[in-house]
Image (spheres, rainbow, N blue to C red):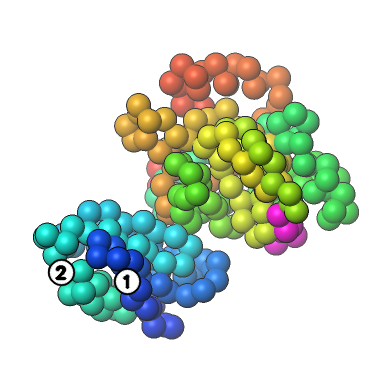
Amino acid sequence: MTQSVTAEPAPRLLACGDTAFTIEFGASIDADLSARVLALDAALAARALPGIVETVPTYRSLTVHLDPLCADPAELGRAVLALAGEPLAAVPSSRLWRIPVVYGGEFGIDLETVAAHHGLAPDAVIARHSAPEYRVAMIGFLPGYAYLEGLDPGLALSRRPSPRPVTPAGTISIGGAQALVASIAAPSGWHLLGRTPEKTFVPERDPVFLLRPGDRVRFVPTPARRWDALAAAAEAGEPVAELCEG
């Protein structure tokens, strides 16, 4: 039986100036809303409507950037809204990434704090965090930052009251009910559980981003003694994450 993504509640069309509009499916972080966003994104890619320059999926909406010289924004917006209201085929999640993660210590300085908050041993947090198969809901905030859905609800934790000015590239963290794979060094108020040596954003690489919305991710706990070798391999351009198709 073919699974489909339904269109209830009705999506909304929101104007974003004269070169973009947003189709909004809801107001919360929800796996069903995310699936509808990705289904619409895939449907637009398949139809190749004239005037569309780029699409940007988020947890609950899809922004469409357009060339106003090639398409009328209002007309194109109505067409995409109508498409969003139809039953759309769910996007198959064919790519699975197994990403090595060194947890705790200098690689995940908040692991013990998160464990204490939930009344768990650090090893139990690692086991719970690495057990799910996550899905990349969106890329946002900074180039290549991957926001994942599928975090064990028992690990959910409000973000830190004071963000850190800098956190390392490759940080694996949680904030609220979300999980994150950080692509570059940047400020963050999330809780740092570990780090991966994999480079998920390389401007000179094709593709530039390792992860894309709809991909699946599994975290593989990795001993700290392997960090130097894996980091050197990643720096040399070798993949350290395992790609499993299908």
Q: CA distance from mark 2 to mark 1?
A: 13 Å
Q: Is residue 156 magenta?
A: yes
Above or below, comparing residue 151 to residue 221 in the picture? below
Which mark is drawn over residue 72? Answer: 2
Q: What residue range appears in magenta? A: 153-159
Above or below, comparing residue 71 to residue 118 in the picture? below
Above or below, comparing residue 52 to residue 170 in the picture? below
Amino acid carrying label 2: it is Asp
Whether residue 231 is visible here, answered yes or no, is yes
Tell me what residue is drawn at x 35 percent, y 62 percent: 63
Tell me what residue is drawn at x 55 percent, y 71 percent: 28
Which sits in the foreground, 234 or 175?
Answer: 175
Q: What residue sits right under mark 1 in the picture?
A: 15
Q: Is residue 138 left or right of residue 112?
A: left
Residue with the most extreme bottom position: 9
Q: Secondary structure at mark 1?
A: strand
Q: Is residue 2 magenta?
A: no
